Every structure is written in structure tokens, then in C-alpha cells.
Image (cartoon, grey):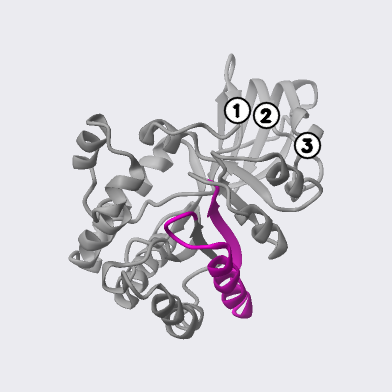
């Protein structure tokens, strides 16, 4: 099947060679072509260029893109698409002045979602989650990372990762899975965080690796959640099984998490609403990508990543 898009007003992100990473001043470079064509053969890009060299050979379909811009699909590198129910009741609490931390301390936030998820069957969880995947596809997303982290039990975390694996098998977009067992300390381990971390390291991470359910490992490095030392422990445990680090860090406080992410070669450090000069300096010249989450800032009414 050959499809030719012609008369494209502007074709965005055209590169002759693949690149792995763009940072710093290179981010000012957006290679584009005006008045362009794009040839797709059996679902893959076969050729592109300006209209003066547009191929004249017979194709199965010609699409006239006059006046339109074509660009790659979005890559969403930080999502929590697999979850059960919702936390809309907590919007009222925030409207009444409660902070995210205060809601979490009384069993809301992540712990609220974990309770609902562990009460939901794997089949129901899949049905809820696939509707969200279909929605992001319709919005133009072609690659997505999905995290666990709302199970906080052996069974709940594996359930989430198996649902992600099923989504990966059933949908055409690229889906990557992240194991986020260290998203919060579950209620049953409230006074035994060390015991929960030991369970993650000794039991859950090895099982995730055995079933090949994740490519990445993540942890919420934050005051009141997991310390820099906890983060180093989890990233090292994941490293033993080939899980690449991606961490939640500097959302509410800056405690040195960016530095431990860089030390362990994290693919990304995400959130970064609270950034000190030393945090920014530690990222310079590294392969660790800083990732902002503006929708999170909007919904939680917290500062935006600088």
C-alpha cells in the first residue's frame, strides 16, 4: 500500500539521520520543509522532499494536504493511564484550601487510588484503561509510557503491569512500561517503610523482571515519600535487572534527587517544579532529560517547572 501526501504547507521534523538526544541550543533547531511531499509505503515513511522533486509514479492513494502542516505524532513520556475509578472528590478538598500533601496524609491521593485499584479486577482495569489509550491516539499520540504505582501490593502492581502489557499487544502505538512500586508507602506499611522497600527489592522487582513486564523503574523521591537513599537503593536494584531509571523528583521540595538520578544514569528526571541552581547545573552535559509536567501543576495549583 502506497500513500502519497502532496502539497504539504510545511513538513515538520525532517532529518536525514536519526538522532538520540536534543538539548541546549540544539533545541532551537526545528528542521522543516515548505511545500513538501511525503511518501508512505506499507505504513512506513519511504521518501519525502519538496514538491519540485515529488515522484510521479503510480501510488494507491494521493492525499492533497494543501494549506496543512504535517508533524510527527506526540511522544508522551510520563503517564498514569492505567488506574481505577477517579479522585474527583479531592478537587473539593483542594478548593476548600487543602494541599496535596495534607490530602495524602489523611489517606487520599495515591493511597486512595491504590485502594480502588486493588478492589478492581484485571479485566475491568483493562476496559477502563483501553478507553484512555484510544482517546490519546485520537489526540495524536503515537508513543506512550505507562507507569504502575497505584497497586502498592505484589498483586496490584503485577496486575497493572499485565494490563499495560495487554494494551501493548492490542494497540498499534508504541507503549513502554515503567515499574513504579515505590510511588508511596502503602497503609499496611505505614510504620515500616524499610519493610516495604525490602519487599520491592527482594520480591517484586525480580518478579517484574522474570515476566518481562517493564523496561523502566521509577520512584517518587520526595519529602514524606522516599528519600535520596531510598531512591539510590531502588535504582540500584532495578539496574541489576536491566531496568532503566526514570524518577519523580523535585515536585514539592528539592532534596538532592536530581543528583542521584544523574548518578544512576536516569533516562529522565520528571516534575522539577522546585529547582535550585545546583539542580540545573547537575543536569548540564548529561544524557538525563529534564521533563516538565505542566498539566500536573495546573490541576494541583502548584508552581510550574521553571
Left or right placement of residue 160 versus residue 71 in this view: left
Rendering coords of residue 109 (x, y %) = 30, 50
The foreground one among 101 and 179 is 101
The foreground one among 287 and 194 is 194
Find out whether the residues at labels 3 and 1 contact each other: C-beta distance under 8 Å.
Answer: no
At x 50%, y 69%, the residue is 214
Which secondary structure, mark 3?
Answer: helix
Question: Which quadrant is home to the C terminus?
Answer: top right
Rendered position, 54 above or below 248: above
Which of the 4 quarters of the picture holds residue 238?
bottom right
Rendering coords of residue 150 (x, y %) = 33, 61
The foreground one among 305 and 194 is 194
- CA distance for labels 3 and 2: 20 Å
Left or right placement of residue 56 versus residue 217 in this view: right
Rendered position, 181 above or below 270: below
Find out whether the residues at labels 2 and 1 contact each other: C-beta distance under 8 Å.
Answer: yes
Looking at this view, name the residue that lies furthest to the front.
Answer: 191
Residue pointed to by mark 1: 70
The foreground one among 280 and 62 is 280
Label whose residue precedes the other's in the sequence (3 or 1): 3
Q: Is residue 176 visible?
A: no
At x 78%, y 36%, the residue is 24
Residue pointed to by mark 3: 24
Label whose residue precedes the other's in the sequence (3 or 2): 2
Rendering coords of residue 282 (x, y %) = 75, 49
Which secondary structure, mark 1?
Answer: strand
Amino acid at each position: 500500500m502506497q500513500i502519497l501526501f502532496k502539497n504539504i504547507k510545511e513538513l515538520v521534523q525532517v532529518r536525514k539521520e536519526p538522532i538520540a538526544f536534543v538539548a541546549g541550543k540544539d533545541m532551537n533547531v526545528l528542521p522543516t520543509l515548505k511545500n513538501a511531499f511525503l511518501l508512505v509505503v506499507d505504513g512506513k515513511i519511504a521518501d519525502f522532499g519538496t514538491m519540485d522533486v515529488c515522484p510521479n509514479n503510480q501510488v494507491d492513494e494521493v492525499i492533497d494536504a494543501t494549506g496543512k502542516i504535517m508533524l510527527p505524532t506526540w511522544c508522551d513520556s510520563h503517564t498514569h493511564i492505567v488506574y481505577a475509578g477517579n479522585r474527583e472528590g479531592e478537587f473539593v478538598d483542594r478548593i476548600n484550601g487543602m494541599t496535596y500533601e495534607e490530602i495524602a496524609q489523611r489517606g487520599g491521593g495515591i493511597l486512595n487510588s491504590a485502594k480502588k485499584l486493588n478492589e478492581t479486577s484485571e479485566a475491568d482495569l483493562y476496559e477502563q484503561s483501553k478507553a484512555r489509550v484510544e482517546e490519546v491516539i485520537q489526540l495524536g499520540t503515537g508513543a506512550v509510557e505507562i507507569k504502575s504505582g497505584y497497586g502498592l501490593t505484589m498483586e496490584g502492581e503485577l496486575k497493572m503491569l499485565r494490563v499495560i502489557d495487554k494494551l501493548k499487544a492490542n494497540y498499534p502505538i508504541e507503549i513502554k512500561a515503567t515499574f513504579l512500586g515505590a510511588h508511596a508507602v502503602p497503609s499496611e506499611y505505614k510504620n515500616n517503610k524499610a519493610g516495604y522497600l525490602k519487599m520491592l527489592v527482594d520480591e517484586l522487582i525480580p518478579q517484574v523482571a522474570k515476566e518481562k513486564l517493564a523496561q523502566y523503574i521509577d520512584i517518587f523521591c520526595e519529602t514524606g515519600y522516599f528519600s535520596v537513599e531510598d531512591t539510590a537503593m531502588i535504582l540500584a536494584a532495578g539496574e541489576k535487572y536491566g531496568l532503566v531509571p526514570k524518577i519523580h523528583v523535585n515536585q514539592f521540595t528539592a532534596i538532592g534527587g536530581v543528583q542521584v538520578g544523574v548518578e544512576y544514569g536516569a533516562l529522565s528526571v520528571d516534575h522539577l517544579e522546585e529547582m535550585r541552581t545546583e539542580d540545573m547545573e547537575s543536569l548540564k552535559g548529561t544524557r538525563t532529560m529534564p521533563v516538565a509536567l505542566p498539566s500536573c501543576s495546573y490541576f494541583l495549583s502548584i508552581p510550574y517547572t521553571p
